[in-house]
Image: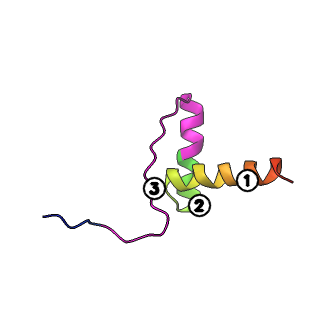
Amino acid sequence: MGTKLGRPTDNPRVVQTRIRMSIDESNMLIECAKKLQMTKTDVVIMGIKKVYAEITK
């Protein structure tokens, strides 16, 4: 049983990061994910990309 499961990708997500946030911040993240129909991870990555684009202008 040495085969990998999941879809192959050119950019696998292998790094895990834990963050601490308040209940209000967690609720905002959950609401954003629901409204955008995305995962919480995707919402966080979207935010990182927006901030990065802003600071590298």
Write down the residue under mark 1. 50
Q: Is residue 41 left or right of residue 3?
A: right
What colour scheme does the image use? rainbow
Q: Looking at the image, is mark 2 or mark 1 nearer the viewer?
A: 1
Q: Is residue 50 above or below residue 29?
A: below
Write down the residue under mark 3. 13
As for residue 10 lying within the magenta part, the answer is: yes
At x 87%, y 54%, the residue is 57
Q: Earlier in the sequence, mark 1 or mark 3?
A: 3
- Mark 1: few, some, or many residues within 10 Å (few <14, many ≥20)? few
Q: Amino acid at mark 3?
A: Arg
Q: CA distance from mark 2 to mark 1?
A: 16 Å
At x 26%, y 65%, the residue is 4
Q: CA distance from mark 1 to mark 3?
A: 19 Å
Q: Amino acid at mark 2?
A: Leu
Q: CA distance from mark 3 to mark 2?
A: 21 Å
Region rendered in magenta: 6-29
Write down the residue under mark 2. 36
Residue 31 or residue 50, whichever sits in front: 50
Q: Earlier in the sequence, mark 3 or mark 2?
A: 3
